[in-house]
Image: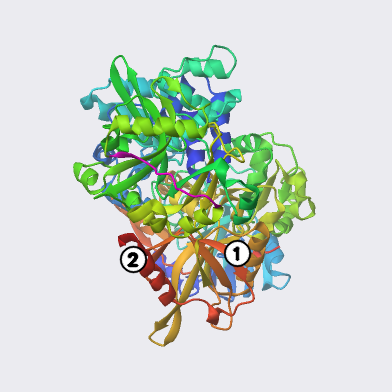
């Protein structure tokens, strides 16, 4: 039994023929197992979807009631038998409801980890290490220059800026699902208890997080606020809104952006960001390499991102590694939801 | 080091001058001595130690990283110092990788416990790390360190710092912070601590030395004002208001003297004796010391005094255009060849001090007489007098302004950008008082051009399309087409900006990142009346022309783009300009 006989790459994405399902397929399929609700992994139009309750709820919020023919919820640590294959969901620590999917058959275990991070996040269950034979890893930040550091330090930087510029409005670009809520939770953990303002596109998902027991303090919509009241405040918005007409309601807006990409100056400058905040929901270089080593897997499949560097690193440690070229991952993009 | 690194990091990203000021003032207020003084020295370029070469940094990283990973990283980041700062290996292990779970037992377990043991939690670093390493100790060690010890010392520091700290350290040791802060801006920020402006600090500056403990004490009201040790200080310049033709009716020609407004840069040339030796300095209008760039002029400033004048390039007795001056200003290294090819020249129009005597309280007419005597006594070819224009009526002067060559400027007429009117009785007053001095510029060149592309602005304008590329018609392969001739981002009112922005958004035909292509057809598009000060040939532009100081003069909503100007019109303007210069 070769791993490829259990999971193989097809035009629709990773496919398990023996279990008749795909994992995070990029086009509509009969049966899909979804790791998390970001749009590059979770698409509408599948026949049946198996995912955590949170992922299903978030997909429903984004795509509407009829996003799939049928749905089935599964909890962390739970397994389902799909023909000759067993699939088990484990927390991935990426966003609320995110999971790694362990696929087992004939004594061989492959873990499709989706997107993951191995650092604390007050808004989702912590990453769980699942020993396996084949580990499928993302590679979004798979270069040694990407080390995300301590998010608390970045939050301190933001709060310091708010105190130096009390007459300006701080706009923080953050992905609507996950990053935005984590940012708010981090601000609360740092003792910031003023109201935090939201772009309209953030509202539904943020309220959903609250309904799942994530405490986020007082939130207000920027839409209803007058210009003078927004001085000295923090507003979270989709990154694409930072340079949008929408910003004109704010007094002297100061653009911040919370993302792992902010580690590289050219990237931050390109986007006209005055206050880059290195906060990421993906594992950084140290996180990726430590995780790969700890799974004990002897074979590593590398999806979307900087595959070359990670494949090279694995090779130097005697691990079999190859890139999995899945078209369409790594494009979680909120351009469509920017207009309020 | 960590707070200083944070400051540099913020400054590098912050586009707005006022915000940069605020960030620096906040730093100076919240940081103690002597740390902040060394930061001020670094920001004003007042530090001197042997700088590390990029090769040294490259060797350090090569000893510590996998060459393939380094190459991939460098390729991605695009900047050596930044790549090194980011991928410098950490000396504590990676963060934990979550709890190990006991899964199905049939799976082969080769996860090594060693890998997990390595994954102990990282200490919670401060945002900028660096622990107790201070900027003060870095600078003190750097100033005494031998060349051979530098690599090892640098590596030790890099081990102790985090990403931003390493980035700042490498900037510091390789020289040149390049965070968009001039020395003057840093002085303005420190002055704000005690309600002083950059000028007040400039006056004291030459008598001060890092870490400026006495300066901070004075600004915070804890000490006396430090003594100015500068025998050749900068004096705040007097500036003129722009004159409209209509203003003339209220002015009496007999109250004024007139001289040419030269198309160079305003400078102050100061010379004084200290301990029997001559000290000479050339200052820009804002008080930056630009002496280093003009040793040829510094050499001839042997007579104690302070001249207010125009810095020009003069070849074979002929003043060159601003374009030529700029070629010298743009050069970093001042080579003997540069001095021969672009000889610096000072055209004097005022005298602020003669020897020890301050002349600023005297009326201009008296200072002018003193100036004439001073320039004659100096007797240097590189320093001459800006001539007065003879006139009896405003009409005389208007004629001279239209045709400087005939009006007395002679062969230098092409370097005249207008006329200065100075009240005979006026003392020399710093700032821009209204009334004593007027600048009366020649009419700008004007063309009608078509808006082709619009780009989003920066800072406050980041949600507005405020930078406009415009073009004129020319004969192309498939008939008439527009060729871009320039870019303008000011001249319009806030209200007009809103109107253009709306027009751009509604008439976009294509997008390239922050740039939008705007419809530009003969019967569809927006005509901009563009004003500019000069025109020169340029190989860098497709049109072969480059405009000086272009701005949007008026929006021509009424004009169909097909009736905008043609490239031939600009060609004839440039021919006229060139004819004027050689006449």
- In the picture provided, is B578 more to the left or to the right than B565? left
- Residue carrying label 1: A335
Give the crowd class for mark 1: few <14, some 14-19, many >=20 residues within 10 Å: few
Q: Nearer the viewer, residue B559 or B169?
A: B559
- In the picture provided, is A237 more to the left or to the right than B488? right
State whether residue B221 appears in this view: yes
What's the CA distance linking mark 2 and mark 1?
A: 55 Å
Instruction: Say if B216 sits above or below A159 in the image.
Output: above
Instruction: Say if B208 sits above or below B260 in the image.
Output: above
Q: Magenta stretch: give its range.
A: B382-393
Helix, strand or loop at label 1? It is helix
Q: Are marks 2 and 1 on the same chain?
A: no
Q: Position of residue B216 (x, y in %)?
A: 52, 19
Q: Residue furthest front?
A: B392
Q: Nearer the viewer, residue A164 or B476?
A: B476
In this view, the mark in front (2 or 1)? 2
Q: Position of residue B448 (x, y in %)?
A: 53, 72
Instruction: Say if B335 sits above or below B199 in the image.
Output: below
Q: Quadrant of residue A199?
A: bottom right
Give the crowd class for mark 2: few <14, some 14-19, many >=20 residues within 10 Å: few
Q: Is residue A36 highlighted in magenta?
A: no
Q: Position of residue A172 (x, y in %)?
A: 62, 49
Q: Position of residue B278 (x, y in %)?
A: 29, 22
- Residue carrying label 2: B579
Query: Which corner quadrant holds the C terminus of chain A?
Result: bottom right
**Chain of the residue on which disc 2 is drawn:** B
- Colour mode? rainbow
Magenta portion: prevailing SS class = loop
């Amino acid at each position: 039994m070769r791993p490829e006989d259990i999971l193989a790459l097809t035009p629709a994405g990773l496919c398990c023929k023996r279990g008749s399902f795909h994992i995070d397929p990029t086009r509509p399929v009969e049966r899909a197992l979804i790791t998390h609700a970001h749009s590059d992994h979770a698409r509408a139009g599948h026949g049946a979807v198996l995912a955590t309750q949170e992922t299903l709820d978030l997909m429903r919020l984004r795509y509407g009631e009829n996003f799939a023919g049928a749905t089935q919820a599964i909890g962390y640590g739970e397994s389902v038998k799909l023909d000759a294959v067993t699939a088990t969901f484990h927390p991935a620590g990426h966003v609320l409801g995110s999971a790694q999917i362990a696929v087992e058959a004939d004594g061989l275990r492959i873990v499709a980890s989706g997107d993951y991070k191995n650092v604390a996040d007050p808004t989702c269950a912590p990453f769980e290490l699942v020993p396996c034979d084949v580990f499928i890893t993302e590679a979004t930040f798979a270069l040694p220059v990407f080390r995300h550091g301590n998010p608390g330090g970045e939050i301190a930087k933001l709060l310091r800026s708010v105190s130096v510029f009390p007459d300006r409005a701080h706009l923080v670009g953050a992905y609507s699902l996950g990053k935005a809520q984590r940012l708010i939770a981090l601000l609360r953990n740092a003792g910031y208890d003023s109201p935090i303002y939201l772009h309209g596109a953030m509202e539904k998902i943020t309220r959903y997080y609250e309904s799942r027991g994530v405490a986020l303090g007082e939130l207000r919509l920027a839409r209803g606020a007058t210009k003078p009241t927004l001085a000295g405040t923090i507003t979270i918005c989709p990154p694409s809104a930072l340079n949008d007409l929408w910003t004109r309601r704010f007094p002297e807006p100061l653009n911040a952006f919370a993302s792992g990409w902010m580690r590289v100056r050219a990237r931050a400058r390109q986007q006209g960001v005055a206050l880059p905040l290195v906060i990421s929901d993906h594992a950084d270089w140290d996180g990726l390499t430590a995780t790969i080593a700890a799974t004990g897997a002897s074979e590593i499949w590398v999806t979307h991102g900087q595959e070359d560097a990670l494949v090279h690193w694995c090779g130097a440690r005697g691990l079999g590694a190859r890139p999995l070229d899945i078209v369409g991952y790594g494009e979680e993009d909120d351009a469509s939801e920017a207009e309020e | 080091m960590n707070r200083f690194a944070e400051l540099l990091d913020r400054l590098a990203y912050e586009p707005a001058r006022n915000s940069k000021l605020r960030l620096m003032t906040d730093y100076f207020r919240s940081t103690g001595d002597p740390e902040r003084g060394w930061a001020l020295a670094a920001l004003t370029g007042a530090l001197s130690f042997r700088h590390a070469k990029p090769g040294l940094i490259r060797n350090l990283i090569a000893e510590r990283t996998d060459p393939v990973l380094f190459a991939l990283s460098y390729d991605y980041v695009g900047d050596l110092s930044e790549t090194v700062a980011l991928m410098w290996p950490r000396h504590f292990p990676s963060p934990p990788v979550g709890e190990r779970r006991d899964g199905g037992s049939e799976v082969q377990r080769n996860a090594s416990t060693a890998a997990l043991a390595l994954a102990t939690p990282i200490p919670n670093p401060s945002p900028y790390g660096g622990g107790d390493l201070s900027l003060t100790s870095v600078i003190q060690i750097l100033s005494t360190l031998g060349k051979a010890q530098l690599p090892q010392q640098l590596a030790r520091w890099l081990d102790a710092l985090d990403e931003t700290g390493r980035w700042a350290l490498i900037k510091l040791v390789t020289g040149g912070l390049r965070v968009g802060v001039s020395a003057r801006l840093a002085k303005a920020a420190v002055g704000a601590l005690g309600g002083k402006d950059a000028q007040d600090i400039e006056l004291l500056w030459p008598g001060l030395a890092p870490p400026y403990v006495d300066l901070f004490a004075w600004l915070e009201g804890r000490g006396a004002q430090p003594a100015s040790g500068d025998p050749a200080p900068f004096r705040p310049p007097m500036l003129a208001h722009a004159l409209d033709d209509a203003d003339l009716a209220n002015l009496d020609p007999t109250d004024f003297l007139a001289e040419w407004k030269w198309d160079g840069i305003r400078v102050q040339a100061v010379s004084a004796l200290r301990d029997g030796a001559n000290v000479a300095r050339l200052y820009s209008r804002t008080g930056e010391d630009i002496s280093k760039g003009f040793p040829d002029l510094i050499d001839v400033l042997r007579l104690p005094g302070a001249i207010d004048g125009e810095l020009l390039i003069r070849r074979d007795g002929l003043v060159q255009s601003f374009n030529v001056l700029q070629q010298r200003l743009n050069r970093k290294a001042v080579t003997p060849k540069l001095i021969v090819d672009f000889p610096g020249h000072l055209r004097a129009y005022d005298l602020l001090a003669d020897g020890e005597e301050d002349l600023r309280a005297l009326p201009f007419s008296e200072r002018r007489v003193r100036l004439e005597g001073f320039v004659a006594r100096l007797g240097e070819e590189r320093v001459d007098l800006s001539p007065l224009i003879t006139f009896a009526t405003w009409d005389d002067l208007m004629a001279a302004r239209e045709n400087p060559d005939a009006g007395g400027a002679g062969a230098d007429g092409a370097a005249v950008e207008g006329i200065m009117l100075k009240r005979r009785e006026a003392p020399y007053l710093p700032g821009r008082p209204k009334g004593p001095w007027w600048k009366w510029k020649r009419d700008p060149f004007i063309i009608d051009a078509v808006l082709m592309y619009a780009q989003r602005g920066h800072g406050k304008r980041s949600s507005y399309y405020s930078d406009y590329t415009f073009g004129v018609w020319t004969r192309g392969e498939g008939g008439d087409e527009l060729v871009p001739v320039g870019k303008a981002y000011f001249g319009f009112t806030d209200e007009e900006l809103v109107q253009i922005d709306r027009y751009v958004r509604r008439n976009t035909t294509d997008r390239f990142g922050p740039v939008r292509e705007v419809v530009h057809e003969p019967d569809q598009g927006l005509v901009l009346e563009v004003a500019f000060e000069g025109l020169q040939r340029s190989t860098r532009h497709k049109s072969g022309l480059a405009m000086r100081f272009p701005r949007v003069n008026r929006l021509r909503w009424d004009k169909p783009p097909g009736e905008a100007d043609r490239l031939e019109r600009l060609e004839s303007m440039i021919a006229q300009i060139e004819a004027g210069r050689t006449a």
